[in-house]
């Protein structure tokens, strides 16, 4: 509005100046009825003001042109930005579509994970229950272990005592071994005959046990039927006797040198086998003899079954 006013005033001033043909300050004018009226005069100050306003207007126009140029550049930049934003928007829409697909996949995966999580939670509960049971078992095992450790400790103590006793026994065994290495080993076992009947005889008869099964130390003679003590000591002797004859006596006697130390007999009335057995422990000097004799009118019977035997061995030397 200010620019339009200034332009209007400027046009009026120029028109008045041209009306008097002289360009003077005064000029007659007429009113709207065509009647003459006093002329208006444009003063120098007004012209000066108009010029100032024109300069200001020019400056404003220049500034507006600059501003318009800047604005146009801004508009171009905004257009370019909008184009870039449009491209970005397309990209974002594509990414959004992809993201929505991923979200859908994630929802599916999440459902599967929730199912797995539920199963895992169930397993955890089961494991908790199992762990509680295992904890109880562990407490029991610890108590049992403590008891076992105490028993082991007691066993170690007992074992130490047993080891000491074993060491002593082993020492005694070694001593006995060393002692027995110098001792004679004497043992024999014999049977009478395979010929069947032996006796009866009118006189007491020396029995010779001809079947020798063992004769360690060779103290028994299968020729004479006599055992001779190789060392002084305590000996153990045993015999058996069998006969089948009816209405006859059967029995044997064991002699030490010329003295009877044991005798046994039986009388057969039914013709069935009669059996005798006995044993004796006796002290002998070196050279003493032990033998078996058949009393007068007594008989025996033997075969490969070895019913009549004579045996003995050294218990310990003295």
Image (spheres, rainbow, N blue to C red):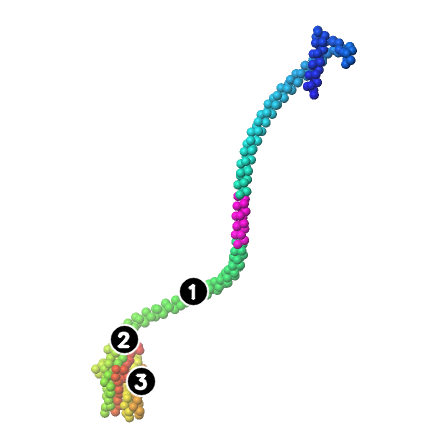
Badges 2 and 1: C-beta atoms under 8 Å apart?
Answer: no
Residue located beneath label 1 in the image: 156
* Residue 103 occupies quadrant: top right
Mark 3 vs 2, N-terminal side: 2
Residue 58 tag number: none
Residue located beneath label 3 in the image: 277
Q: Which residues are magenta?
A: 102-119
Circle 3: element type = strand
Q: Position of residue 129 (x, y in %)?
A: 53, 59
| Residue 114 against residue 17 in the figure, above or below | below
Mark 1 vs 3, N-terminal side: 1
Q: Position of residue 254 (x, y in %)?
A: 28, 85
Mark 2 vs 1, N-terminal side: 1
| Residue 175 against residue 198 in the figure, above or below | above
Residue located beneath label 2 in the image: 185
Cα distance between the residues tagged 2 and 1 = 41 Å
For the N terminus, the image quarter is top right
Horizontal relation, residue 241 to residue 13: left or right: left
Q: Position of residue 34 (x, y in %)?
A: 77, 11
């Amino acid at each position: 509005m200010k620019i339009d006013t200034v332009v209007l005033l400027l046009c009026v001033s120029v028109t008045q100046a041209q009306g008097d043909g002289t360009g003077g300050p005064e000029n007659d004018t007429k009113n709207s009825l065509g009647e003459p009226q006093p002329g208006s005069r444009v003063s120098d100050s007004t012209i000066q003001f108009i010029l100032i306003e024109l300069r200001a207007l020019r400056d404003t126009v220049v500034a507006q042109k600059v501003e318009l140029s800047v604005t146009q550049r801004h508009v171009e930049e905004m257009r370019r930005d909008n184009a870039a934003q449009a491209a970005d928007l397309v990209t974002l829409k594509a990414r959004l579509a992809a993201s929505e697909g991923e979200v859908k996949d994630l929802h599916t995966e999440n459902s599967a994970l929730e199912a797995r999580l539920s199963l895992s939670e169930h397993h955890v509960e089961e494991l908790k229950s199992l762990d509680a049971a295992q904890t109880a078992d562990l407490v029991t095992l610890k108590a049992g272990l403590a008891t076992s450790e105490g028993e082991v400790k007691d066993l170690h103590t007992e074992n130490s005592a047993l080891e000491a006793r074993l060491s002593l026994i082993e020492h005694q065994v070694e001593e006995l071994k060393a002692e027995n290495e110098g001792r004679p080993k004497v043992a024999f076992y014999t049977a009478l005959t395979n010929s069947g009947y032996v006796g009866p005889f009118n006189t007491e008869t020396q029995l010779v046990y001809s079947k020798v099964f063992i004769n360690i130390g060779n103290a028994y003679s299968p020729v004479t039927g006599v055992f001779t003590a190789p060392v002084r000591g305590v000996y153990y002797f045993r015999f058996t006797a069998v006969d089948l004859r009816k209405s006859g006596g059967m029995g044997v006697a064991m002699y030490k040198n010329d003295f009877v130390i044991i005798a046994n007999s039986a009388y057969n009335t039914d013709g069935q086998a009669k059996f005798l057995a006995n044993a004796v422990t006796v002290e002998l000097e070196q050279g003493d003899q032990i033998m078996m004799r058949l009393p007068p009118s007594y008989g025996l019977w033997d075969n490969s079954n070895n019913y009549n035997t004579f045996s003995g061995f050294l218990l310990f030397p003295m």
